[in-house]
Image (tube, coloured by chain):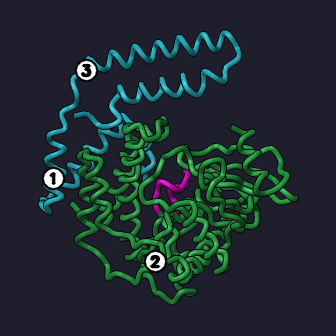
Chain colours: A green, B cyan
């Protein structure tokens, strides 16, 4: 496998170091390789596993290019390869930085980074939301009803998720004009060094959406990595993040909107846990990690109940 | 029908992981032998579990359908939360402690 990959890559990149397959899911492979003195990362499609509602690698590469052109801090996209040993792939710069959420939240040497991260995250998101839509015309609009369809596809009864969906239907804020959204903007999908943010990663969920929804996704408790008291991804309060975002965009997103979309993010992730488990159960991608999400989704359902209580639901 | 993955399905996932991903990496004969024994044990658990009756989720299904229809009577959240708590005591018992002072 490694020899084949090396041969396929050398046909495109010239002489390279031994490719190293990085740990990760089966739906997408990530290979670390060096060529011509450059540190590269090759993202390649997995063996026939297609995840619903994610971008093709070709579209993801285009989004990355658009983000890079717009000045978003991303690994430089270098080359799309339609057929790399039988599957599509692209090559981008391999940036140095911590990406493991738990370490970003807890490592002492990243303490200084954590103090600047909330404002930096807001700045990046403001830049993302300013990417011209015509630059990425293939992006699809988010559809709120899709959450219900996905839950119905799973076919299990989950009253807590239903209650969250019900509250969201009843309290919908006035919709904002859909903009280019990252779709998974949170600690766990960014790279950080001791000075702060160095890159925004994982663009496969990019779509067009209410920007407040994208802004609130990083508040979901599942991504606080042991620091539940710090609402923004275990690294800071939501206030300075929201303030900086509003300062840059002039959108005037209200704290109540963040609350609303934080709940929506939890509902989406609770359903996401079930659909991930379905990938295992259906045989699409057998994995203990996916399987157990079917049960750990109860944690997210508990958070949904907690947030509903805070909003005065009885 | 029981919550998914069912206990049997979880045991099966563990067996696949141990046999498919761990066993091929082991060179130590004693470890290989003990892993095979452990796989046997998990297999026993899985087959034992098939004898249990499936959990009746009729009540949960009815509650979910009522909420979907917009019929949310007072006390619904408390009932829903108690059900989630019961599931968490199996799936992730330590998680509830994280809400200590909130």
**Which residue is denoted by mark 1 in the rendering?**
B65
**Which residue is denoted by mark 3 in the rendering?**
B52
For label 1, the crowd category at 10 Å Cα-Cα, with few meaning under 14, some 14 to 19 and many 20 or more, is some
Name which residue lies at 76% across and 45% down: A6
Question: What chain does badge 3 belong to?
Answer: B
Prevalent SS, magenta region: loop
Towards the viewer: B25 or A161? B25
Quadrant where the image shows the N terminus of chain A:
top right
Does B61 appear above or below A147?
above
Calculate the distance from the C-alpha at mark 1 to the C-alpha at mark 2: 31 Å
Residue A242: percent from the left, percent from the top?
A: 52, 77
Name which residue lies at 37% across and 39% down: A282
Residue A15: percent from the left, percent from the top?
A: 85, 52
Quadrant where the image shows the C terminus of chain A:
bottom left
Q: Residue furthest bottom?
A: A250
Range shown magenta? A220-230
Does A180 appear above or below A219?
below
> Can residue B101 be found in the magenta stretch?
no
Q: Quadrant of residue B59?
A: top left
């Amino acid at each position: 496998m490694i020899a084949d990959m090396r041969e396929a890559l050398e046909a495109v990149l010239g002489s390279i170091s031994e490719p190293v397959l990085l740990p990760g899911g089966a739906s997408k492979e990530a290979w670390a390789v060096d060529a011509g003195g450059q540190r590269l990362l090759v993202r390649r499609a997995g063996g026939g596993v297609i995840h619903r509602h994610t971008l093709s690698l070709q579209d993801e590469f285009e989004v990355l290019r658009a983000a890079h052109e717009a000045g978003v801090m991303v690994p430089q996209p270098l080359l799309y390869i339609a057929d790399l040993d039988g599957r599509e792939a692209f090559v981008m710069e391999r940036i140095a930085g911590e990406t493991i959420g738990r370490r970003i939240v807890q490592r002492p040497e990243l303490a200084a980074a954590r103090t600047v991260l909330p404002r930096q995250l807001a700045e990046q998101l403001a830049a993302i939301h300013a990417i011209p839509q015509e630059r990425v015309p293939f992006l699809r609009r988010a559809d709120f009803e899709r959450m219900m369809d996905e839950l119905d596809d799973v076919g299990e009864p989950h009253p807590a998720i239903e209650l969250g969906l019900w509250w969201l239907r009843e309290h919908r804020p006035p919709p904002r004009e859909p903009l280019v959204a990252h779709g998974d903007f949170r600690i766990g999908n960014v790279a950080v060094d001791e000075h702060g943010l160095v890159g925004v990663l994982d663009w496969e969920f990019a779509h067009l959406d209410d920007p407040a929804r994208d802004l609130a996704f990083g508040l979901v408790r599942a991504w606080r990595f042991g620091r539940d008291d710090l609402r923004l991804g275990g690294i800071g309060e939501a206030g300075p993040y929201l303030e900086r975002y509003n300062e840059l965009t002039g959108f005037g997103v209200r704290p109540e909107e963040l609350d609303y979309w934080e709940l929506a993010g939890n509902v989406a992730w609770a359903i996401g846990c079930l659909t991930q488990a379905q990938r295992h159960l259906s045989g699409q991608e057998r994995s203990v990690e996916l399987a157990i999400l079917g049960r750990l989704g109860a944690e997210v359902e508990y958070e949904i109940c907690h947030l509903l209580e805070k909003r005065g639901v009885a | 029908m029981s919550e998914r993955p069912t206990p049997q399905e979880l045991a099966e996932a563990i067996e696949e992981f141990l046999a498919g991903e761990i066993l091929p990496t082991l060179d130590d004969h004693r470890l290989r032998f003990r892993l095979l024994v452990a796989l046997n044990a998990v297999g026993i658990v899985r087959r034992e579990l098939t004898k249990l009756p499936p959990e009746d989720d009729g009540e949960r299904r009815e509650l979910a359908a009522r909420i979907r229809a917009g019929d949310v009577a007072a006390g619904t959240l408390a009932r829903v939360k108690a059900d989630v708590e019961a599931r968490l005591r199996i799936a992730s018992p330590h998680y509830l402690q994280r809400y200590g002072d909130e």
